[in-house]
Structure formats: C-alpha cells, structure tokens
Image (cartoon, coloured by chain):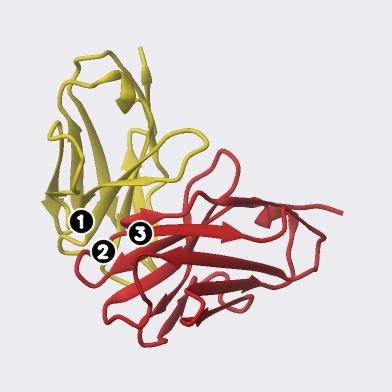
Chain colours: A red, B yellow
C-alpha cells in the first residue's frame, strides 16, 4: 500500500534553511507518471502548494516562493527532499508531502504532516 | 497563476441535510478540479477528482459537478463524520492552487 511520511526539524531559527524529507513506499518515482508534491498549512489557515518533482526529474515551484525552494529526489532511497531557505516566522506551518499521478492529477495519498515552527 | 475561491467560507448544517459548496477558478480549468476533506489535526483526504469522479472508498453521498470555471461539491444526507473543512484544488496548471476552504459545522 502507498504511504508517505515527512521528517525534519520541529523548530528552526529565522534566516536558517529548512530541510524536509519525504520517505515513501508502495510506489516508485522511477515509474512513469508518478509525482510527489510538498504542500503546507499555517495554523488555522488554508493549504498552500509549494513544489513538485516528477518521475522524469521535472521540477516545479510556487511562484511566490520559487527563489527560496529546492526540491530533489533520491529514487534509491524512495525519498524526496525539500529545502526552504531564509526561514521566517510566517513559514511556520504543517508541511505535507503528497503523491499525484498523471492518471488522476490529484493528491491521492498524503503523509501525516510535520509541524515546523520558526522562532528564535 | 490560477486563483481559486470558495463559497461559503463556513456553514452550519444538521445531520441529514443536503449541503452544497461552490468553487470558482479565475480562468478556465476544464474539469481539472479536485475536492478534499480535512478534519482537525489530520491530512486532507481526496474525495472527488476530475470534477465528478468519486475516489475509491468515498461514500456515494459525495458528488461533484462543473467544468470551466464553476464547480460544486454536494453532500447528500450529511453524516456526523462529514463535519470538516472542504478544499477545492485545480490541477490544470502548475503551480497548483487550493481554494481557501469551507468549514462545515454542526447547527
């Protein structure tokens, strides 16, 4: 069965770079049509899509955050890594990774999320 | 980027009610529209994809309609477990975007 799980620091200082890892199972990012996205949700607020990496290593970013975001994959480890530079308290949020495919173009499986607080 | 709006932002309803939530895109997105349900402290759950296709395992009281820029999610005979926040999301263009959400609570 498909599972995803996010990991990373719970607390980050302002100006630091956040590194989050999504470890997944039940599918391969070597398989045509597979995609993994990162999505975040500040406390009490709406979902915000951040970035996506595809099976063919194509990468896509949020327009407002693209200068700060980097996404990469390690297919041998079944992992996708997201970095967000120059963290600010406004980046405090729960960060989710989610799978989508070129069959349904929807986020059909999600990780449980990891809460990241930006504070000194 | 495609902007998504939802109405209402919140609503109160009773068990057994029929509830309809509206989602609008800032430009045409064909039928590349998905609906998610999110309960407090949990990850979103896919309900409807491609505007009207029911995700496997989702009860048939959930249905979606629409194309172009205007879409609806309808819940027939609201159940206690349906009290949650609902988000629409477009998958026509990258970057992807979500609506601001509609919270359904108990009247």
Check disc 2: other Cα within 10 Å, few if <14, some if 14-19, many if 20+. Answer: few
Callout 1: helix, strand or loop? loop
Is the same chain shared between marks 1 and 2?
Answer: yes
Picture coordinates of residue B82, whole percent (x, y)? 30, 27
Query: Residue shown at 37%/15% (left/top)?
Result: B106
* Residue A87 in sight in this render: yes
Residue in the foreground of this view, choosing between A83 and B23: A83
> In the rendered structure, are the residues bearing label 1 and label 2 in contact, judged by CB atoms less than 8 Å apart?
yes
Query: Residue shown at 74%/71% (left/top)?
Result: A17
Q: Which residue is mark 1?
A: B69
Report in which chain the residue with disc 3 lies.
A
Check disc 1: other Cα within 10 Å, few if <14, some if 14-19, many if 20+. Answer: some
Report in which chain the residue with disc 1 lies.
B
Task: Determine the image quadrant of residue B77.
Answer: top left
Q: Which residue is mark 2?
A: B27
Q: Which residue is mark 3?
A: A2
Q: Is residue A47 above or below residue A36?
A: above
Picture coordinates of residue B24, whole percent (x, y)? 26, 50
Is the same chain shared between marks 3 and 1?
Answer: no
């Amino acid at each position: 069965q498909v599972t995803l799980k996010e990991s990373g620091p719970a607390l980050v200082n302002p100006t630091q770079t956040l590194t989050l890892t999504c470890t997944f199972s039940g599918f391969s990012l070597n398989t045509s049509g597979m995609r993994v996205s990162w999505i975040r949700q500040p406390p009490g607020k709406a979902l915000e899509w951040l970035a996506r990496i595809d099976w063919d290593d194509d990468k896509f970013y949020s327009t407002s955050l693209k200068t700060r975001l980097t996404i990469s994959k390690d297919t041998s480890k079944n992992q996708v890594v997201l970095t967000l530079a120059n963290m600010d308290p406004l980046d405090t949020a729960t960060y989710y990774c989610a799978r989508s495919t070129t069959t349904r173009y929807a986020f059909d499986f999600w990780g449980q999320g990891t809460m990241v607080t930006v504070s000194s | 980027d495609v902007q998504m709006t939802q109405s209402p932002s919140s609503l109160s309803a009773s068990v057994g009610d029929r509830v309809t939530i509206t989602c609008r895109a800032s430009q045409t997105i064909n039928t590349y529209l998905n609906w998610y349900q999110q309960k407090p402290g949990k990850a979103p759950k896919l309900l409807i994809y491609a505007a009207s296709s029911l995700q496997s395992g989702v009860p048939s009281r959930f249905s979606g309609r629409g194309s172009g820029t205007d879409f609806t999610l309808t819940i027939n005979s609201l159940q206690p477990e349906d009290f949650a926040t609902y988000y629409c999301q477009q998958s026509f263009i990258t970057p992807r975007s979500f609506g601001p959400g509609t919270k359904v609570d108990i009247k």
